[in-house]
Amino acid sequence: MIKRTEIVSTIRVLIRETLLQESENLVSHDVVVAAIDNAIRPERLDITIKNFRILMIEIAIAESARDPGKHTNEMSGDIKGVFQISDVAIEQTQKPEILPRTKKKLNGSGALVEPWDDQKNENIFVNLKMQAMAACLYTLYLYYERANKPSLETIEDRAAFWKKYYNTAADKDGTVEHYISAVNKFKSSALQS
């Protein structure tokens, strides 16, 4: 028979965990992956770059993963959200000359009320799907315009791309080793859950 003290203790633990998650703005990994998949749907961005989806999932892990299977969705500071994207990065994607065909397709898909170039940053950050869209567009811009279409075949390739182009030089954790370690640790903890 379960004692009342055990029930009360279990309820307290659950309440504490729930409050902690809410206070830390935690989002489940499954929800993050669903937001990425929503962004790269064929009628929206139609990404044909091999391993782009994997890259975006790994970026989310490297930028905001928490064990087990959670991501922080922090809204303070110069970089925000699950993908740790900046206002400057979003503004870059909103320049008319950046990814014009991609944005034309996105704008015509019915996914947005306003065209991408007219989206307000505060509206992007409060919606995980919009964060994923911004991160995907920014990553596409980097891939095509800055990085000259590198291979994303291996985790080392993706880590090198993230380190050199997506992450800031000021980030002490912005190393290839951090990326690979974060991804491997996250995958390992997911398998044990």
Image: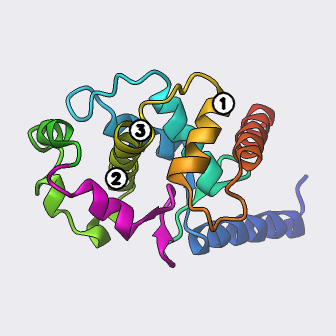
Residue at the farthest bottom position: 77
Along the line of sight, the residue nearer the viewer: 76 or 21: 76
Q: Is residue 132 rendered to the left or right of residue 122?
A: right
Residue wearing tag 2: 134
Q: How far apart are marks 3 and 2 (CA)?
A: 14 Å
**Please, what secondary structure does the residue beneath circle 1 have?**
helix
Q: Which residue is drawn at 39% across and 55% down?
A: 128
Q: Is residue 126 among the parts visible in the rendering?
A: no
Residue at figure coordinates x 38%, y 55% from the top left: 131
Report which residue position mark 1 lands on: 155
Give, as a three-letter code, the residue at label 3: Tyr
Label 2: element kind: helix
Q: Could you tell me if the residues under marks 3 and 2 are in contact, i.e. CB atoms within 8 Å?
A: no
The reply to whether the C-beta atoms of the residues labelled 3 and 1 are less than 8 Å apart is no
Q: Residue at x 56, y 40 (%)?
A: 161
Residue at image point 56% right, 61% down: 168
Q: In this view, does 148 lie above or below 31?
A: above
Q: Label 3, secondary structure: give it.
A: helix
Question: Is residue 158 shown left or right of residue 67?
Answer: left
Q: In which quarter of the image is residue 86?
A: bottom left
Q: Residues within 10 Å of mark 1 (few under 14, many from 20)?
A: some
Residue kind at label 2, given as amino acid type: Ala
Sequence order check, earlier mark of 1 and 2: 2
155 with respect to 153 (left or right)? right
Q: Decide: few, some or many residues near mark 2? Use Cα within 10 Å; few <14, some 14-19, many ≥20.
A: many
Q: Which mark is residue 143?
A: 3
Q: What is the three-letter code of the residue carrying label 1?
A: Ile
What residue range appears in magenta? 76-97
Residue 82 visible to an observer of this rendering: yes
What is the CA distance from the residue labelled 1 to the residue labelled 2?
A: 22 Å
* Whole-percent x, y for residue 190 in the image: 72, 37
